Image (cartoon, grey):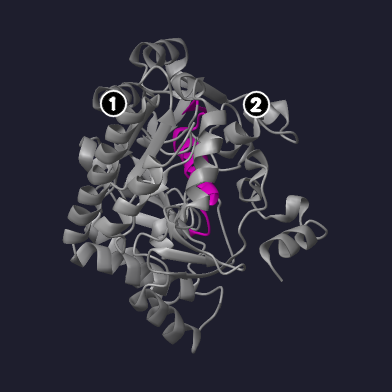
Amino acid sequence: MNSHEIFEESKQYMPGGVNSPVRAFKDMEITPPVIKKGEGAYIFDEDGNQYIDFVGAWGPMILGHCDKDVVKAIKETAENAIAFGAPTELELKLAKHMCTTLDNFDMVRMVNSGTEATMSAVKLARGYTGRDKIIKFAGCYHGHFDGFLISAGSGVMTEGIPGSAGVPEASIKNTVIGNYNDIENIEMIFEKMGNEIAGVIIEPVAGNMGVVPAKKEFLQKLRELCDENGSILIFDEVMCGFRVAYKGAQSLYEVTPDLTTFAKIMGGGLPCGAYGGKREIMEKLSPMGPVYQAGTMSGNPIVMAAGLATLTKLYENPDLYVKLETLGEKLEKGALKIAKEKNLPLCVNRCGAMITLFFNEEGKVENYEDAKKCDTDMFKKFFLHMLNSGINIAPSQFEALFINTTHTEEHIDSFLQAMKKFQV
C-alpha cells in the first residue's frame, strides 16, 4: 500500500486517520507521507521517497534515527524484560544518572509522557503548598491536561481552536494566564493573588508557538516572585531539556527552578517522561507523602534502557553539543541571508538545535501575540516546497525544526539550497 491508500483506510479506524492531530497535515491539504523507516538524518516513506529529516519525531531523535547504541540497549533488554510493574535496576541506573549529572535534581519520578510529567508536577506543587492556582503563559503548551488547554500553542494554534471541547470550565478556573516575557504582567498577577499561587509553569525555551526563548531577566523575575510568595517554579523542559544543552535551558539562563519536567529525548525515542527537583518537595509524593501519582508502565525497563543509552552518550560526548550549535548557527545565518536576498519577511528564532523560521512582517517573535501575526499561508507554500524538495519539516508555522547529531554541513546546505528555490 502507498501513503495515500494507508492514510485513507486509517480514517476508518482512527479519528482523522491519526493518533495525534498535527500528523494529519490538515492545514497543508495533502496526504501526509506515511513513514516506513528512519536511519540517521533520513526518513523514508511508503512511496519510496527519502527526506532529510528536521522533525526527529518532534524532538526526541537527537542522536538521529535508530542510533546503534540505543537499538542495542533496546534489543538486549527486550530479551529478558518487557514489563513488570515492579522495581528494576534499570530504573535505578537512569534515576541515578539524572540526579548525579543534572543540577537542582535531587530526586526523580519516572512517568510515560510529557503531559503526565507536567500535570503531575503541577499536582505536586499544589499538594506541597496547599494552594490551588497555577500560572501558565499564553502560547506555552504543557500537554493535553485539562488545566493547560487554555491559550495553548502548538496543535491548538495550528487547528485554530481557542482551547478544546470537552474541557469543563471548572477544570481551568484555577489556571491563570500570563503574558510570556512580560515582567509587568507577571508582577501584576502576583500582586493581586500571590498568596493563592501554588506554582508557575513555563517553557524556558518555548517550542509550541514556534521557538521563543524566554528573556533572562523575565525568568529571574519569576524566580524572585516565587521566592517572595512561597510558590513553586516549574520549568517545563520536555522539549528543550537535553537539547539546547545537556543540563537544559536552566543551565544557560542560570535560573534554578524548584521542579523540572522532562520527556522526549530522555526516552531515546520511546514513550517516557519524568519530573524531579528538590528533595523536600519530591518527598511529598506517595508512598512517602500525601500526593498520589502512579503508573503501571512508569519506569518500563526497555524505555529505561533506551533512555540511559541516550543520556549517557550525550553526557560523555559534550562535543556533540558543539556540533549542534555550529549546525544551528549555519542554518540560521543561511536562512536569514536567503530571506534578505529574496525579500522574504522572515524572522529566525533559535536556541541551540531548536529553530523556527517565522514568516513575520514585524521581524520579531517574542510572545504569543507576535506568533499569531505570522503569515501561515506563506508558511504553507514554504512547507510544501521543502517537502517536495526532500526536506521534512513540521507541517505547522508554530513548531520547531530540530537538528540531530547525524546531520552534517551538507544536510544544512541541502536545506538552504532548497530554500533558495522557494518562490512566493
Position of 196 relative to 382 (above/below): above
Which segment did they paint magenta?
A: 111-138
SS at mark 1 in the image: loop
Residue 288 in view of the camera = no
| Residue placed under numbered mark 2 in the picture | 162
- Residue 337 lies left or right of residue 178; in this view the side is left
Circle on res. 327: none
Q: Amino acid at mark 1?
A: Lys
Q: Is residue 36 above or below residue 341?
A: below
Residue 123 on the magenta segment: yes
> Which label is found at residue 215?
1
Q: Which residue shows up at 56% across the image and 78% down it?
A: 84
Q: Is residue 111 above or below residue 224?
A: below
Does the rendering let one see residue 253?
yes
Q: Say which label, 1 or 2, has the lower sequence index.
A: 2
Q: Is residue 317 left or right of residue 232?
A: left
Q: Quadrant of residue 219?
A: top left
**Callout 1 touching callout 2 (CB < 8 Å):** no
Question: Does residue 4 appear to the left or right of 424 in the view shown?
Answer: right
Whole-percent x, y for residue 142 in the image: 51, 40
- Tell me the residue at 60%/35% (across/down): 158
Name the one closer to the observer, 391 or 269.
391
Q: Foreground residue, 361 or 286?
A: 361
Residue 232 appears at what percent x and percent y?
39, 33
Q: CA distance from mark 1 to mark 2?
A: 26 Å
